[in-house]
Image (cartoon, rainbow, N blue to C red):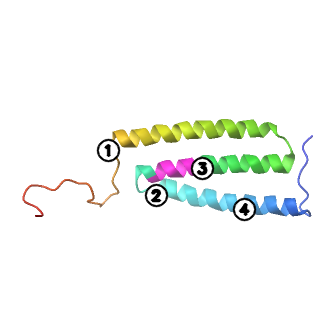
Amino acid sequence: MTRLINLDSFLGVTVTVALGLLALALILTFVRLLRGPSLSDRVVALDMFSIMAMGLIALRVIATGQALYLEIAIALGLVAFLATVFFARLIEARGGELREGSDVGVPEEPGEGS
Protein backbone atom coordinates (compact mmCIF):
# COMPACT_ATOMS: atom_id res chain seq x y z
CA MET A 1 0.00 0.00 0.00
CA THR A 2 1.37 3.39 -0.90
CA ARG A 3 1.58 6.10 1.69
CA LEU A 4 1.13 9.72 0.80
CA ILE A 5 3.07 12.52 2.39
CA ASN A 6 1.14 14.47 4.99
CA LEU A 7 1.12 18.07 3.84
CA ASP A 8 1.28 19.23 7.46
CA SER A 9 4.82 17.90 7.78
CA PHE A 10 7.95 19.71 6.64
CA LEU A 11 8.74 16.94 4.14
CA GLY A 12 5.26 17.20 2.63
CA VAL A 13 5.60 20.92 2.09
CA THR A 14 9.07 20.46 0.64
CA VAL A 15 7.86 17.81 -1.83
CA THR A 16 4.97 20.06 -2.87
CA VAL A 17 7.28 23.04 -3.45
CA ALA A 18 9.71 20.85 -5.39
CA LEU A 19 6.88 19.59 -7.62
CA GLY A 20 5.87 23.16 -8.37
CA LEU A 21 9.42 24.18 -9.24
CA LEU A 22 9.86 21.12 -11.44
CA ALA A 23 6.61 21.94 -13.25
CA LEU A 24 7.87 25.47 -13.93
CA ALA A 25 11.22 24.10 -15.14
CA LEU A 26 9.43 21.64 -17.45
CA ILE A 27 7.44 24.47 -19.02
CA LEU A 28 10.54 26.60 -19.57
CA THR A 29 12.46 23.64 -21.00
CA PHE A 30 9.59 22.86 -23.35
CA VAL A 31 9.71 26.45 -24.61
CA ARG A 32 13.45 26.08 -25.26
CA LEU A 33 12.80 22.79 -27.06
CA LEU A 34 10.29 24.44 -29.39
CA ARG A 35 12.15 27.71 -30.01
CA GLY A 36 15.61 26.25 -30.45
CA PRO A 37 17.19 28.07 -32.24
CA SER A 38 19.85 25.43 -32.97
CA LEU A 39 19.98 21.67 -32.86
CA SER A 40 22.39 21.87 -29.92
CA ASP A 41 19.86 23.86 -27.89
CA ARG A 42 17.22 21.25 -28.57
CA VAL A 43 19.55 18.41 -27.53
CA VAL A 44 20.30 20.18 -24.26
CA ALA A 45 16.55 20.71 -23.71
CA LEU A 46 15.89 16.99 -24.25
CA ASP A 47 18.67 16.16 -21.79
CA MET A 48 17.09 18.53 -19.27
CA PHE A 49 13.75 16.79 -19.78
CA SER A 50 15.29 13.47 -18.83
CA ILE A 51 16.98 14.97 -15.76
CA MET A 52 13.70 16.51 -14.62
CA ALA A 53 11.88 13.23 -15.23
CA MET A 54 14.39 11.54 -12.93
CA GLY A 55 13.69 14.29 -10.39
CA LEU A 56 9.96 13.64 -10.63
CA ILE A 57 10.56 9.93 -10.11
CA ALA A 58 12.72 10.71 -7.07
CA LEU A 59 9.95 12.89 -5.63
CA ARG A 60 7.50 10.05 -6.19
CA VAL A 61 9.81 7.71 -4.28
CA ILE A 62 9.99 10.21 -1.41
CA ALA A 63 6.22 10.76 -1.38
CA THR A 64 5.18 7.10 -1.58
CA GLY A 65 8.13 5.22 -0.12
CA GLN A 66 8.22 2.79 -3.06
CA ALA A 67 11.90 2.32 -3.88
CA LEU A 68 11.05 0.26 -6.98
CA TYR A 69 10.83 3.47 -8.97
CA LEU A 70 14.52 4.18 -8.39
CA GLU A 71 15.39 1.42 -10.84
CA ILE A 72 13.28 3.17 -13.46
CA ALA A 73 15.14 6.42 -12.80
CA ILE A 74 18.49 4.68 -13.20
CA ALA A 75 17.42 3.09 -16.49
CA LEU A 76 16.11 6.45 -17.72
CA GLY A 77 19.41 8.08 -16.83
CA LEU A 78 21.39 5.50 -18.79
CA VAL A 79 19.19 5.80 -21.87
CA ALA A 80 19.28 9.61 -21.69
CA PHE A 81 23.07 9.59 -21.45
CA LEU A 82 23.38 7.35 -24.50
CA ALA A 83 20.94 9.53 -26.45
CA THR A 84 22.89 12.67 -25.57
CA VAL A 85 26.15 11.07 -26.71
CA PHE A 86 24.49 9.97 -29.94
CA PHE A 87 23.16 13.46 -30.67
CA ALA A 88 26.52 15.03 -29.84
CA ARG A 89 28.25 12.71 -32.34
CA LEU A 90 25.56 13.50 -34.91
CA ILE A 91 26.11 17.24 -34.49
CA GLU A 92 29.87 16.74 -34.70
CA ALA A 93 29.53 14.68 -37.87
CA ARG A 94 27.39 17.40 -39.45
CA GLY A 95 30.00 20.00 -38.61
CA GLY A 96 27.75 21.74 -36.11
CA GLU A 97 24.68 23.77 -36.87
CA LEU A 98 24.66 27.53 -36.97
CA ARG A 99 21.88 29.71 -35.69
CA GLU A 100 19.69 31.23 -38.33
CA GLY A 101 20.98 34.62 -39.44
CA SER A 102 24.47 34.07 -38.06
CA ASP A 103 27.46 34.35 -40.36
CA VAL A 104 29.98 32.86 -37.94
CA GLY A 105 31.84 30.00 -39.57
CA VAL A 106 30.49 30.68 -43.05
CA PRO A 107 33.38 30.87 -45.48
CA GLU A 108 33.91 34.23 -47.13
CA GLU A 109 33.46 34.51 -50.83
CA PRO A 110 36.50 35.50 -52.89
CA GLY A 111 36.99 39.24 -52.98
CA GLU A 112 35.28 39.93 -49.65
CA GLY A 113 37.04 41.05 -46.51
CA SER A 114 40.82 41.61 -46.49
Residue in the picture at 42% in, 49% down:
39
Residue in the picture at 74% in, 36% down:
71
Give the main secondary structure of the magenta stretch: helix
Report, in whole angstroms, how far the alpha carbon at label 1 lies from the one at label 3: 25 Å
Report, in whole angstroms, how far the alpha carbon at label 4 lies from the one at label 2: 23 Å
The residue that label 1 is drawn on is: 95
The residue that label 4 is drawn on is: 20
Residue in the picture at 60% in, 59% down:
27
Of the numbered discs 4 and 1, the one sitting upstream in the chain is 4
Tally of numbered discs: 4
Mark carried by residue 11:
none
The amino acid at mark 4 is Gly
The amino acid at mark 2 is Arg
Report, in whole angstroms, how far the alpha carbon at label 4 lies from the one at label 1: 39 Å
| Mark 1 or 3: the one toward you | 1
Magenta span of residues: 41-48
| 90 relative to 59 in the view: left or right | left
Of the numbered discs 3 and 4, the one sitting upstream in the chain is 4
Of the numbered discs 2 and 1, the one sitting upstream in the chain is 2
Q: Check whether the beta carbons of the residues at disc 3 and disc 2 lie within 8 A of each other.
A: no
